[in-house]
Image (cartoon, rainbow, N blue to C red):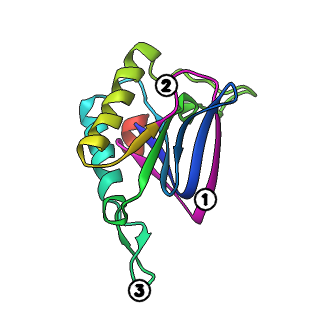
Amino acid sequence: MRVVLQRVRQAAVTIHDEVVGRINGGLLLLVGIRTGDTEADVAYVADKVAVLRIFEDENGKMNRSIQDAGGAILSVSQFTLYGDVAHGRRPSFITAARPETAEPLYEAFNERLRAAGLEVATGRFGADMQVSLVNDGPVTLIIESKGEAELR
């Protein structure tokens, strides 16, 4: 499982000119599920997101988590995070999980974040979405449930 995490001042996801998810400060998560990912991967990444200290404290140090800062999360499924561009001119998505596997894991990920007391808005799995954001910092990180050696 791979998540691109961006600290944002605001973010929204739109489908056919309708805003389906919006937050006013917190984290935008682009969520990729890979073939072979399990509930353990979901738990590892969700728990890491919930406690990662990337919000500034009163001294300007990144010392507060999303839970501490009281921010919200906008979670957007994105299978293209597992696009392989090593060969040829078109990405291969062979390692991305099939929708029937990925969607339940994506939903479980969002539910685990909610269970941690976080407000979670989402896009719509499998839809053509337009995502807008104002990055704060900018702070952008990648969280993966498996090391590079395990991915090969």
**Amino acid on which disc 1 is placed:** Asn
Residue at 58% across / 22% down in the picture? 127
Residue at 43% across / 48% down in the picture? 73
| Left or right of 55 on screen, residue 128 | right
Mark-to-mark CA distance, 3 and 2: 41 Å
Mark-to-mark CA distance, 3 and 1: 21 Å
Residue at 43% across / 30% down in the picture? 33
Q: Which residue is mark 2?
A: 96
Label placed on residue 59: 3
Label placed on residue 80: none
Disc on the earlier residue, 3 or 1? 3
**Amino acid on which disc 3 is placed:** Asn
Does the magenta portion include 81?
no
Disc on the earlier residue, 3 or 2? 3
Residue at 73% across / 27% down in the picture? 88
Instruction: Tell me if residue 136 comes above or below residue 97 in the rendering.
Output: below
Determine the residue located farthest toward the right in the rendered image. 89
Callout 2–callout 1 Cβ contact below 8 Å = no
| Left or right of 146 on screen, residue 43 | left
Q: Position of residue 13 (x, y in %)?
A: 59, 37
Mark-to-mark CA distance, 2 and 1: 26 Å
What's the magenta region?
Answer: 122-146
SS for callout 1: strand
Q: Work out which quarter of the rendered image holds the C terminus and state it.
A: top left
Label placed on residue 135: 1
Q: Nearer the viewer, residue 117 or 61?
A: 117
